[in-house]
Amino acid sequence: MARLKRLYFPGASHHIIQRGNDRQACFYDKSDYTVYLDKLKDASKKYHVKAHAHVLMTNHVHILATPSAEMAD
């Protein structure tokens, strides 16, 4: 079953959690973390989302982010 559409308010902060499949590792060495943070920075600029804080664990990620505009459907 597909996930339901999430509640969304521009300007409201969101706690985002991303996990590896079956909680397997997402990151294996320092370069993996660096690439992820570079992609996060690029995406936040492209989509006008402020990433306030992040925690990168070996098998999951937490991000506190605030979108500044309406989402396109």
Image (spheres, rainbow, N blue to C red):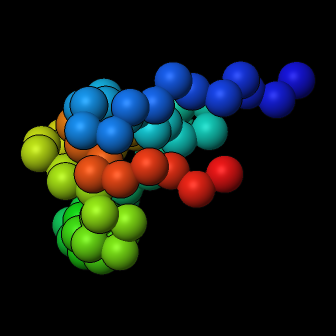
Q: Nearer the viewer, residue 41 or 27?
A: 41
The count of marks equals 0
Query: Could you tell me which residue is drawn at 88 percent across and 23 percent down?
Result: 1
Query: Could one spot residue 13 in this view of the protein?
Result: yes
Query: Could you tell me which residue is drawn at 38 percent across and 66 percent down?
Result: 47
Left or right of residue 45, residue 21 in this image: right
Q: Residue furthest right?
A: 1
Can you give x and y, in whole percent of width and height, for residue 35 in the image?
30, 74
Query: Could you tell me which residue is drawn at 82 percent across and 29 percent down?
Result: 2
Q: Nearer the viewer, residue 11 or 16?
A: 11
Looking at the image, residue 1 lies above or below residue 27:
above
Looking at the image, residue 65 lies above or below residue 36:
above
Can you give x and y, in whole percent of width and height, for residue 55 in the image?
18, 40
Query: Could you tell me which residue is drawn at 66 percent across and 51 percent down?
Result: 73
Query: Could one spot residue 63 in this view of the protein?
Result: no
Can you give x and y, in whole percent of width and height, for residue 43 in the image?
36, 69
Can you give x and y, in whole percent of width and height, for residue 3 in the image?
73, 27
Looking at the image, residue 44 lies above or below residue 9:
below
Q: Quadrant of residue 61?
A: top left
